[in-house]
Every structure is written in C-alpha cells, then in structure tokens.
Amino acid sequence: MNFEEAVKYISDAACYGIVPGLESMTRLCRELSNPQDKLKIIHIAGTNGKGSTGAFINNILIKAGYRTGRYSSPSVIDYLDKIQIGTTMISKEDFCLYTQKVKNAVDAVVEKGFSHPTVFEIETAVAFSYFADQHCDIVLIEAGMGGKSDATNVIKKSILSVITSISMDHTKYLGDTLEKIAVQKAGIIKRNSNVATISQQPKVISVILNTCNDKRAQLKIAKIYNIENYSCSTTSQTFDYKRYKNIKINMIGKFQVENAALAVEACEILDDTGYSIDETAIYSGLAETVWPARFEIISADPLFIIDGAHNEAAAARLRETIDICFSDKKIIYIMGTFKDKNYPETVRLTAKRASKIYTVTPDLTSRSLPAQELAAVIKTYNPNVTACSSVKEAVDESLKSKYHMIIAFGSLSFLGQIRKYIKEVKPDAHQI
C-alpha cells in the first residue's frame, strides 16, 4: 500500500457515514490487541479550543523533556498533520504501514459479519497503533465530534481529561440543548481521574461537576477572573495568570489567553501527579506554541489572518478579538462555511464589522454552502459582499484592496488552501 492508496482507502470509508457509539471501535481495537491500553493519555474534548489547548499542553510537555504523541482533527495544512510525535508529522512510510495494519483488522472485523468502521474510527486506530510503538511518555488524544460516544473514548482510563469551551454545535448528533451537549463532552471523564476545564456557562459547569462527582474525579477550573494585566498587539499577547506573571503567547485572540490558562491548569495537575513540569517549561512552551488557522497571521503586508471560526461561539470570539485588538482597522472578510452550521448567526455576529466581504464555497462536497447562498444571507447585514467562483479569486481580489487587513474564516477546508496559496504568491509573507 503506497501513500495514495492509503489515503484513498480511508477516504473511501466516508460512504459509511458518521456512526456515534463505541461498539465498532471496540471491535476494531480488539483486533489490533488494544493499542490504546498501552498509552498514557490526556483526553481532550470540547466545542472550541481543543486544538489550541492541546497545542499549548503539548509544547509545554516537550519543553519539560517528555516524548509526546498527539492526535487531532481535522487536518489543516497537510493530511498527515493530525498524527504527530512532538511537533513532527507521521511519515508517509509509517502512515502506509499502520494504515495497512488497520486495514487488515478492518477486513477481519467485516469478515466476522460486523459493520465497516468509519473514516474517523480508522484514523483513530492508526493513531493508537502508531503511538503504541513509538514509546511516548504521554499522548494527547483529541475527541472528534463529541466525547461520550466518540471513537476516541474507547480508552479505559486517562491521566487527565481536559474539557475546553462548550457551545452549540453538531446538534444533530450531540443534542439540541447546551446541557445535552455538555453531557456528551463530559463523557470522557473516567472514574477516579483528574479533570481540567475552563470557566463557562453555569449550566455547563454543573454538568461537568455532576459527572465528576459521579465518577469521583477531581476537578480544577481555570477561572477567567484570574487572567489579569492583559494586553495585545497584532502579533502577540501578554497576561498574568495566578502566580505566573507576564506570560507571552504568539497566538492572537483573547480566547487563546483562556486556552493558555487552561493549559497551565492542566500542566499543574500533571506536575502534582508525578510529571515534573517547571515554570520555565510553562513560559517557554506557551511562548513558542503555534497552531495553524487559529487566528494565524500568514502575511504582515497586508496583514492577513486565517481563523477556523465555524460556529456561533467561535464567531463571537472572533468579533471580540477584532474589537479589542483591531478596532481601528478597515477589514476585508473571506468567508466560507458548511450547510449544517448555524451560519446565519455567524453572519449576524460578524458581517457588519467588515468593509468588504468575499464569499467562497469551501470545497465540492454536499456539505458545502454555495458562495452565492452565503452572500445572500450576508447582504441583509452588509451590502458590500461578492460571491467568488474560487478561493484564488477571493484572495486575489482581497490583495488588490487598500484596506488595512484581511481575515479569512469559517471552514478549515478552505483555510488550508488560502495558506498554501499565500505562500506561493507571497513567499516571504509568513515571516513576520
């Protein structure tokens, strides 16, 4: 199996859809001799902030001297960036090797008369198998869509559960209220374990606290009111958090400060439970963390930012960041989203702030919202909108403008395209 064959094998499994539940994943892992049971796992769930919080924790652990594995989704820049050792992607050779191994297990499961695993189940099994052979000290596993019924939750125990900000998303699968969604996210909490979360709506905290009480798990909350002396520029943010003074991060957005605070709480728990993590590792780990497409600056002139704000809560935080850090800027948006997202609310929260908006169709899947339909919704709030036939057209038109900055946001599927294209047309743009 070569790389193209491996990618095609996994992508072809999309025909099996999304199937919440652990039965299929349990059978698949059993065929693989349960590689997940060999790992020391930090399990991360939430609606927004999973990737950034995981990146902060991962980098702190690396600075503390640990060999880490990390599984996150979806891919942003490269198909293989979802599976990493430290900050290095799995090689094509290893990806092929472990995909073949998982395929053999899938064939065995199907031959016994059971259903074919989904794309996410296959990818998760590849990650588990790979990490089990890599002798990682700690592995960070990011839940996909939910938590309780997510394929990653096949793990029996974890050294730490991290629950990031929870909001309304994927209601078709997770429930139509915040409490129902919180129950699904809190489903990663294991008995007699440690849990870290961030300050959020009382109804969400109540669900997490009740789950911790039922599982006799210890909960620490990163309290937002402990974030003090905050300041931001176009390239960095500084703040104090509890005893940590003048923390610097190079990821923009007030929400990233909160993600960083959650990462600090998580690492304090790890330090208290036998993993040595000193303050130097925390400071340097936070300062050197990067995470693609999370309010990422990909050009300094013009200032060009890409952000994966694809739901209502993320859109609200995007608008907050604009108001705090870029209140004096004239801004162009490039927007693209999926039909199953609450895009009218995202538009309501953000559209009025832009001087000009270009819309794109993220990709050619049935989930994609056509650029013309998104533009029609935007016109209710901002008449200066143009639907583009391609991502390239939207970027080219934006670069011709005289406005101060460009922000592309929405589906991660087209943000990766923009990042790649900017690197081609402005090869030095990303060196800020």
Image (cartoon, rainbow, N blue to C red):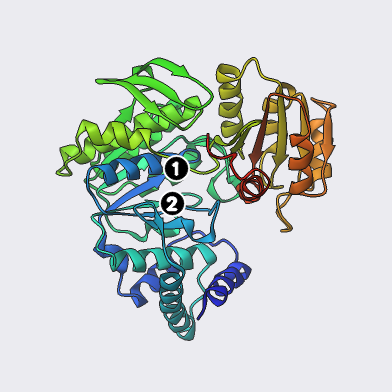
From the viewer's perspective, is 9 left or right of 92?
A: right
Determine which residue is flagged by label 1: 50
Residue 5 image offset from top left, x and y in percent = 56, 77
Q: Amino acid at mark 2?
A: Ala
The furthest residue to the left: 274
Per the rendering, the mark at residue 360 is none
From the viewer's perspective, is 36 left or right of 276?
A: right
Check disc 1 and report its element: helix, strand or loop.
helix
Q: Nearer the viewer, mark 2 or mark 1?
A: 1
Q: Determine crowd level at label 1: few under 14, some 14-19, many 20+ residues with C-alpha closer than 10 A.
A: many
Per the rendering, the mark at residue 143 is 2
Vertical arrangement, residue 429 with respect to residue 22, above or below? above
Residue 7 image offset from top left, x and y in percent = 55, 70
Question: Is any atom of residue 19 visible in this view?
Answer: yes
Hey, which quadrant is residue 171 in on the image?
A: top right
- Badges 2 and 1: C-beta atoms under 8 Å apart? yes
Hey, which quadrant is residue 296 in on the image?
A: top right
| Total numbered badges shown on the rendered structure | 2
Q: Which residue is located at x 48 percent, y 36 percent?
A: 166
Question: Is any atom of residue 219 visible in this view?
Answer: no
Q: Which residue is located at x 36 percent, y 49 percent?
A: 188
Check disc 2 and report its element: helix, strand or loop.
loop
Q: Which residue is located at x 28 percent, y 20 percent?
A: 242
Of residues 248 and 211, the one nearer the viewer is 248
From the viewer's perspective, is 361 left or right of 236?
A: right
Of residues 229 and 215, the one nearer the viewer is 229
Q: Which residue is located at x 37 percent, y 26 percent?
A: 248
Residue 10 image offset from top left, x and y in percent = 55, 70
User: Marks 2 and 1, Cα distance to the nearest angstrom?
Assistant: 8 Å
Q: Determine crowd level at label 2: few under 14, some 14-19, many 20+ residues with C-alpha closer than 10 A.
A: many
Q: Amino acid at mark 1?
A: Lys
Which of pointers 2 and 1 lies earlier in the amino acid sequence? 1
